[in-house]
Image (tube, rainbow, N blue to C red):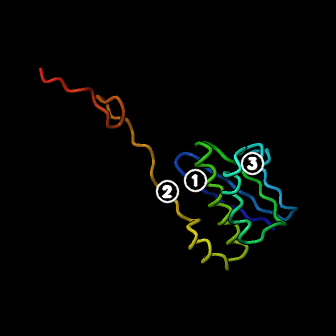
Amino acid sequence: MKYISYSKKKTSKIKLLMINGNGKITINNNNVKKYFGNLYNRNFIFLPLILSNFKNKNFYIKTNGGGKCSQIICIRISICKCILLFNCNYKKIFRRLNFFSIDDRIVERKKYGYKKSRKKEQYSKR
């Protein structure tokens, strides 16, 4: 059976497909170790899988845009959504561990006359 989940943060967008298999995770046709080299980043993704004992599911993930950190958070949120589609008993655990918290902050746009969004030229009194 297929389970599909979507998630986004800032400019990164994730599409995740969960199917029966042997526990393999591929991100943009790469394995997790190749895509995210850091062990901390990989553990951040695997935490919902460890808590829910999902060892026989394959995850195929397509990422687009954003940086690695926002992609990792998106992947974790979409994995949690797929697990809840499969078994909704984990909802209280995921809520308590704050796995669904979506950060809505985005970069403020640059205004004309300023160097950045809020940075101005230095004021000269004379």
Counting from the top left corner in percent of width and height, residue 68 is at 62, 44
Residue type pointed to by label 2: Asp
Q: Is residue 19 left or right of residue 87?
A: right
At horizontal 54% and vertical 45% (from top left) the residue drawn is: 11
Q: Are marks 2 and 1 in contact (CB under 8 Å)?
A: no
Image quadrant in which the C terminus is located: top left
- Of the residues under marks 2 and 3, which one precedes in the sequence? 3
Q: Which residue is mark 2?
A: 103
Q: Are marks 1 and 3 in contact (CB under 8 Å)?
A: no
Viewer-side residue, 37 vs 121: 37
- Distance CA(mark 2)–CA(mark 3): 22 Å
In this rendering, is residue 115 above or below 45? above
- Of the residues under marks 1 and 3, which one precedes in the sequence? 1
Mark 3 crowd level (few <14, some 14–19, many ≥20, 10 Å Cα): some
Comparing labels 2 and 1, the label whose residue is closer to the camera: 2
Residue furthest toward the bottom? 89
Counting from the top left corner in percent of width and height, residue 115 is at 34, 28
Location of residue 92 by image quarter: bottom right
Counting from the top left corner in percent of width and height, residue 82 is at 69, 66
Q: How many marks?
A: 3
Q: Name the secondary structure under disc 1.
A: strand
At horizontal 79% and vertical 54% (from top left) the residue drawn is: 25
Q: Which residue is mark 1?
A: 8
Q: Is residue 39 left or right of residue 95?
A: right
At horizontal 44% and vertical 43% (from top left) the residue drawn is: 107
In this rendering, is residue 123 above or below 43? above
Counting from the top left corner in percent of width and height, residue 50 is at 74, 67
**Tag shown at residue 27:** 3
Residue type pointed to by label 3: Ile
Residue furthest toward the front? 39
